[in-house]
Amino acid sequence: MSVEFGFLLVQCLSGLASASSLFIIASGLTLVFGVTRIVNFAHGSFYMLGAYMAVTIVPWLLQIERSPTLFFAGVLISACVVGVLGVLMEILLLRRIYKVPELFQLLATFGVVLMVQDAVLHIWGPLDIAGPRAPGLRHGVMILDQRFPAYDLFLIAAGPVVLGLLWLLMHKTRFGILLRAATRDRDMVGALGVNQALLFTGTLFLGAFLAGLGGALQIPRVSASAQMDLSIITEAFVVTVIGGMGSIGGAFLAALLIGQLQAFGVLIFPKITLVLVFLLMALVLVVKPWGLLGRPENAAGLSALPEGIMQPRGFAAAEKLLVLLAVLAAAAVPIFGDTYAIKVATEVLIFALAAFSLNFLVGNGGIVSFGHAAYFGLGAYASGLLVTKLGMPMEPALIAAPLVGGLFAALFGFFIVRLQGIYLAMLTLAFAQIAYAVCFQWVEVTGGDNGIVGVWPSAWAASHSTYHYIVLVAAGLGIFALRHVIYAPFGASLRAARDSAPRAEAIGIDVRAHRWLGFTIAGAAAGLAGGLYAFSKGSIDPTLLGIPLSVDFLAMILLGGMQTVMGPVLGAAAFHSIKDVFMPLTDHWRFLLGASIIALVLIFPRGLGGAYAALRARLSGGAP
Amino acid sequence: MTLLVVENLNKNFGGVVAARNVSFALAAGEILAMIGPNGAGKSTSFNMVGGQLRPDSGRVMLAGQDISGLPPRAICRLGVGRSFQVAQTFLSMSVLENLQMALIAYAGRTRDMLARSSALYRDEALGLLDQLDMAEQAEWPMGALAYGDVKRVELAIALAGAPRLLLMDEPTAGMAPAERAALMRLVAGIARRAGIGVLFTEHDMDAVFAHADRILVLVRGEIIAAGSPEDVRANPEVQRVYLGTSGLRAALRARAAAHG
């Protein structure tokens, strides 16, 4: 009995240790969001940089003397260096994007993630680097006959200490009081004559410092690796969202909850701990849409012009000709192009449908989805599994793809459309990560990390050119149908709900039901694209549901211009061709991609479609 | 018969009483004004009738049917149109498209994925705009309109649902004085012709005393006086807590201008 109790106690203690680490990281994220209203994807990169700094600096210091003092001095120095990097990011990037729509902010900070990933690989190499253990804390402590690492006991104390220090900072210093004021009402603080630039820069230092500290403190437990950033950022997002974005106390509470959930969840459901965490988040958001201790956004009041499709107009005669030429060109690729050209063209068509379906949500419905790849990937898995596991032919498997994509979009969307703004975006991300985790961890069925090979089309469609025509017809019809819906009353109703939900409700539109239906339709279209993709590749793997692919889709609609109807098609073609041409040329394609996304947000926020619309307006002499 | 009956509505926000036992009735074709200082609970009472807020207790009856706690869209379908304190329109659409959207919703065709929305209900939309002297700006984007015109479009949207009851939360807020009078005359005319009951809140005493058949005075969530403009004006408590002497003069002037 006492052994069992000891075991449970130790389990609980290790939950507390991870809660502490998680809180230190998440507190920085929530702080930065509270003041700047930017959801900083790069926070995970700061965490990773903290770990890499520490595995570089700490061993060097320990060569002088193996003392705990120097170990923790090294940790603090690493955190400070990362804090300075945060300042650089604020000055060089964030300052320019405080006023742009949140989708663009998310994308820009994700650009930083990509750049840092490549920088880390370049500086530290692809191998994981194990850090030194902390002198004086290397031993185990016996707790009720169970061995528990002393360093973890130290971590358990570190979280509350950081919370206490933050509390003192927030309540006893002028900087902290301004931070709290800015979290409540940024504009008012500005109107009172506070130097906002300095305040924001200071906030970013503190936020990045905390992320770096969290990373540096981890080195005795986990080695520094180039994959740490994305895995920690999703957890940190979950903590801040559950706690209420901007609330440090909420983050502490949420970290405790998640720490325990993981510690005990791993005993009961070892395979789906990640899923449990996201389920908790979904549950909390359904009951408390602003998190445990969060405050509602001041969204009501004056309505601003939406960022998205405005008045969609039909094709002019010349544009109809352009569309016809584009279709003909796509149809001519198998005649004039080689196998490689056909492959690229097929993929462009598939991504065009996926991007179009995403813009149906984002541009037309104002529903910013950060996990659209989930429905693409689920469609691909549906097709792939039906063919390889049940031995079905291609045709019914392709029909199943949109059905499964739509089914899951309906299931996830039921929760998602209850939320607004950044909380909605975070929940789309969370559901996508659940789907990703299931495909990744359910090895017996999905093949796990390796995925499944042998997803080939039926014999009659086996040649690259025949399959290209199948894709041309299916994706073309999909895009055409979605486009038609944008111009139909349903599409207009989605725009109406986006422009003003209170007005839409007041004229009798069930906003939530319409958004739900829209979300389902977009998910079905993405599912179809995913099914088509599975057969074109011959294989499926979890990256088809991953965040990077979701970001690719967003980059496509951003590049094409999300305020235009046909822009996403253009964006998909440009993005995929560029990626396909440049990726093999350089080892640093992530760095280039990240830099391009940032450049796009900063200097070209209306995309190619926007540039075309401006040109068209100038030529016709009308108002822009 | 009585169009709207409000019985003992109560609403608290975290201990602050925003409405206490608010009761009143409104007949078809009647224009009822709700006045009171800032924070008196006008918008709260209003939003409980429109469905934007759920009352803690009490009932709202529309033509004999209990509508308390129904969502706004259901209340709209029962024949209630409304305008908001800060005008709510569809900013990405043209004036005409705003009206077409309202008419599509009224016809229950918002899930239609086949028709082309720009071709639907054009004539009806133009007719509504004509009624409010906005037909010339039909093709304008909403963003290009003056605020007074935005308010008129919002009114047209509310009328597109052929309402029995019109709720207007400060219809003239943010408008120039000349525009205010014109808008209120327009509303009163339409309401009387079509037999629409109108409930409105307003800070502009000219508008209230010139057009309201009856007036409710709310202070700190409670109705302290109700009756004809003459009764309310003469009520010493209303004068003390709300109207003051300058308000009283405005009331007299407005009444004289409207009926003189």
Image (cartoon, grey):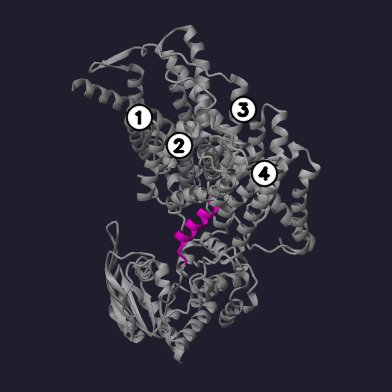
Query: Mark 2 is on which residue type?
Result: Val
Q: CA distance from mark 1 to mark 3?
A: 33 Å
The question of residue A171 being in magenta is answered with no
Q: Nearer the viewer, mark 1 or mark 3?
A: 1
Say above or below: A580 vs B116. Answer: above
Left/right placement of residue B155 relative to residue A599 reads: left
Give the number of the disc on residue A438. 2
Residue range corresponding to the magenta coloring: A509-523
- What kind of element bears circle 1? helix
Res. A10 in view = yes
Say above or below: B44 vs A447. Answer: below
Using the image as rendered, state which of residue A461 and residue A211 is in the foreground: A461
Q: CA distance from mark 4 to mark 3?
A: 39 Å
> Are the residues flagged by discs 1 and 3 from a single subunit?
yes
Q: Residue at x 61, y 20 (%)?
A: A123
Query: Mark 1 is on which residue type?
Result: Val
The residue tagged 1 is A266
Q: Nearer the viewer, mark 1 or mark 4?
A: 4
In the image as oriented, which residue stretches furthest toward the right? A336
Provide the chain ID for the residue under circle 3. Answer: A
Q: Nearer the viewer, mark 4 or mark 2?
A: 4
Give the number of the disc on residue A461. 4
> Are the residues flagged by discs 4 and 3 from a single subunit?
yes
Give the number of the disc on residue A118. 3
